[in-house]
Amino acid sequence: MELKVDENKNNISVEIIDGDETFANLLISKLQKMKGVEFAAYLRDHPLSNKITVQVKGDNPKKSIVAAIESIKEDIASVRKHLPAITKKEINVKKTVKKVDTVKKAVKKTKTKSKKKE
């Protein structure tokens, strides 16, 4: 991924070559929620283009982009931290399903007792 940055005091434009819209969407989403950011958007020139341009306007757009990226990194770390727990829960669910299947098989094997007529 190649970057070209053009900045002045209150505006920054970052051209991302060979980037994708996933990162651009995430970055813009974070930036739009931040104080001091007046405008944040990205543009892809054409659906077949490999160039995305992110534009940010505000009090300190460079600082805002850095803060947004740090926030994204924290979110990713949080997801990674919880992945083992999610995997563990899936394993526990599989064990529970296995136990349920064992009980189901045992129940199916038992013969129903018929009531005697009196």
Image (cartoon, rainbow, N blue to C red):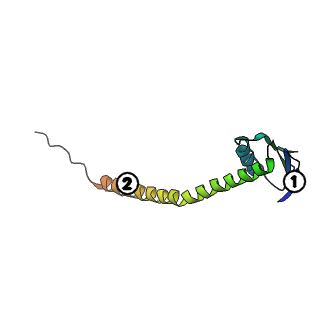
Which residue is identified by label 2? 100
Residue 117 percent across, percent down from the top left: 13, 40
Residue at 52 percent of width and 56 percent of height: 86
Residue 97 is left or right of residue 50, and the answer is: left
In the picture shown, does residue 60 fall above or below 87?
Answer: above
Residue at 14 percent of width and 43 percent of height: 116
Q: Which residue is at the far left?
A: 118
Element type at mark 2? helix
User: Which quadrant holds the N terminus?
Assistant: bottom right
Of residue 59 and residue 37, the one placed in the foreground of this image is 59
Of residue 107 and residue 1, the one placed in the foreground of this image is 1
Residue at 50 percent of width and 58 percent of height: 85
Residue 41 position by quadrant: top right
Element type at mark 1? strand
Res. 32 mark: none
Which residue is identified by label 1? 5
In the picture shown, does residue 9 fall above or below 85?
Answer: above
Q: Residue type at mark 1? A: Val
Residue 102 is left or right of residue 14, and the answer is: left
Question: Can residue 116 be seen from the camera position used here?
Answer: yes
Of residue 20 and residue 67, the one placed in the foreground of this image is 67
Q: CA distance from mark 1 to mark 2?
A: 59 Å
Residue 114 is left or right of residue 51, and the answer is: left
Question: Can residue 47 be seen from the camera position used here?
Answer: no
Q: Nearer the viewer, mark 1 or mark 2?
A: 1
Residue 60 percent across, percent down from the top left: 79, 47
The crowding category of the residue bearing disc 2, from other C-alpha atoms within 10 Å (few below 14, some 14 to 19, many at least 20), is: few
Residue 91 percent across, percent down from the top left: 47, 60
Residue at 42 percent of width and 59 percent of height: 95
The crowding category of the residue bearing disc 1, from other C-alpha atoms within 10 Å (few below 14, some 14 to 19, many at least 20), is: few
Q: Total number of numbered labels?
A: 2
Q: Residue type at mark 2? A: Val
